[in-house]
Image (cartoon, rainbow, N blue to C red):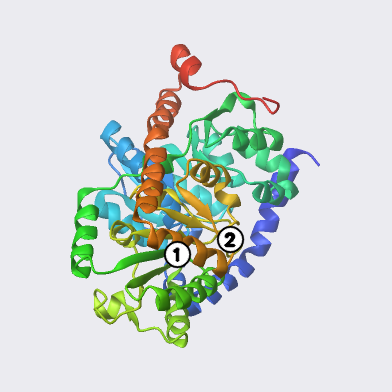
Amino acid sequence: MKLELRSRFYSLVTTILTPLVLIRLATRGIKTKAYLQRWHERFGWFKSPKFKTKSIWVHAVSVGEVNAAIPLIKALMEKYQDHCFVLTTITPTGSDRVQQIFGDQVFHVYLPYDLPGAVKRFLRKTKPDLAVIMETEIWPNLFRFCKKRDIPIVVANARLSEVSMKGYRWVESLAAKAFNDTAYVAAQTITDAKRMIQLGCYPEKIFVVGSLKFDIIIEDPIIEKGQEIRDHYQNSRLVWIAASTHQDDEIEVLDAYAVLKQRHPKLMLVIVPRHPERFQSTTQACRQKGFNTQLRSENGLVDIEGDVFVVDTMGEMLEFYASSDIAFVGGSIANIGGHNVLEAAVFSLPVLVGPNTHNFTEITQILNDCGGSQTVHDANDIIRSMEYLIENQEARIKMGQAAYELVKRNRGAVQLTMNLIESAMEQKPLNTQLKAKHFPKITASN
């Protein structure tokens, strides 16, 4: 089937499946009512911002991608002060994070579904000069219409896991075409770049820049808030944070804590569930274990009698990392693929992480190799690692310092991505010397 016919067939199938997508959206809305709001934006129906100048558009799926994009977006705002900024997300939590960080500095809407009409409406209203797509959100129609309108696309912080690569197989030719409609793909690792080339992306479009997550910005108010929380404990508690957790993570963490709490009465557990629809079930699970469980939304901060503190609010995880002693990063015992361990590492915390980290394979591996993290498979592993860290302050400090030093050594992806963006905006080839120094040629075999 020729590519044009494949594109039409893809659009037809996408249109046919839209009612099922809406049903799924409505189902999610039963637990999280925000999913029931602003549906029209997902079809490109929203009030035009009527920008006086053209815009730069950045897409980040949800909270994690928004957090990773923050330093890049701030660099773009500094460089292109004559442009307006459009930020799109897919999830309500991502939307909340955009509003929390950028407020009215940006125009925010949900990303339209990959339907020709919706995509055309979105591009017509926002008038982007540039599209920056975080991670690897490959939407054939979106990329195709950007190409037709001469809107350069830079895929930033691009990654492609083995699982995701298999998922693209059924639309391999369209995925390859989407990749090749871009100006540049800024890959996190050589492994990611090779997979994209195997999928059909032209090697000359791909450059390995590292992960933007290493360029995480911890601003003074976060540090100050973390210190306020720490002062509230009066340094009388050892604080273990389990962040971005899912149900299977919490089962093992709570089983481990039940043992650890008996042996170390001053140990406090802070749990930050990944999704707001799980706040209630997490709280119930803690209370069923018999723990004195307090909530951020009800108690503000935990009192002296509290065992477990559930952060049932959004956008505060970094502050609670800043006030903790040891971290477990979720989505990793649960078979989710892991979450960003660097958000803990940047606070010099020793990190415990499960074995299921295929979304962050290289980052998790190098954190482990440098001595900044330990892998735990279940409650028994957690107990063993926690016992060692609780009883050995020197080991906690050493692991935390190793984690932080890793973050510092690997910073620089923002500037390299900006080099690619500047080249795309100016429609000029990369500076030869810069390219030779920072962007070695990548092929499927090297």
- Real-space CA distance between mark 1 and mark 2, rounded to the nearest whole angstrom: 26 Å
Closer to the camera, 24 or 395?
395
- Which element is circle 1 on? helix
| 131 relative to 203, above or below | below
**Which residue ends up furthest to the top in the rendered image?**
433
Residue 387 is labelled as: 1
Q: Position of residue 361 (x, y in %)?
A: 58, 46
Closer to the camera, 73 or 337?
337
| 62 relative to 407, above or below | below
**Which residue ends up furthest to the right in the rendered image?**
1
| 405 relative to 63, above or below | above
The answer to whether the residues at label 1 and label 2 have Cβ atoms under 8 Å apart is no
Q: Where is residue 179 in the image (x, y as percent from the top left)?
A: 61, 36
Q: Where is residue 171 in the image (x, y as percent from the top left)?
A: 72, 47
* Location of residue 381 by image quarter: bottom right
Give the mark, 1 or 2, whose residue is nearer the N terminus.
Answer: 2
Could you tell me if residue 137 is visible in this image? no
Residue type of the residue flagged with mark 1: Glu
Q: Where is residue 42 in the image (x, y as percent from the top left)?
A: 49, 60
**Which residue is drawn at the image coordinates 18% and 62% (left, top)?**
228
- Packing grade of label 2 (10 A; few <14, some 14-19, many >=20) is some
Closer to the camera, 20 or 222?
222
**Which residue is drawn at the image coordinates 23% and 63% (left, top)?**
230
- Which element is circle 2 on? loop
Residue 336 is labelled as: 2
Which quarter of the image is occupied by the C terminus? top right
Left or right of 229, for residue 348? right
| 312 relative to 320, above or below | below
Residue type of the residue flagged with mark 2: Ile
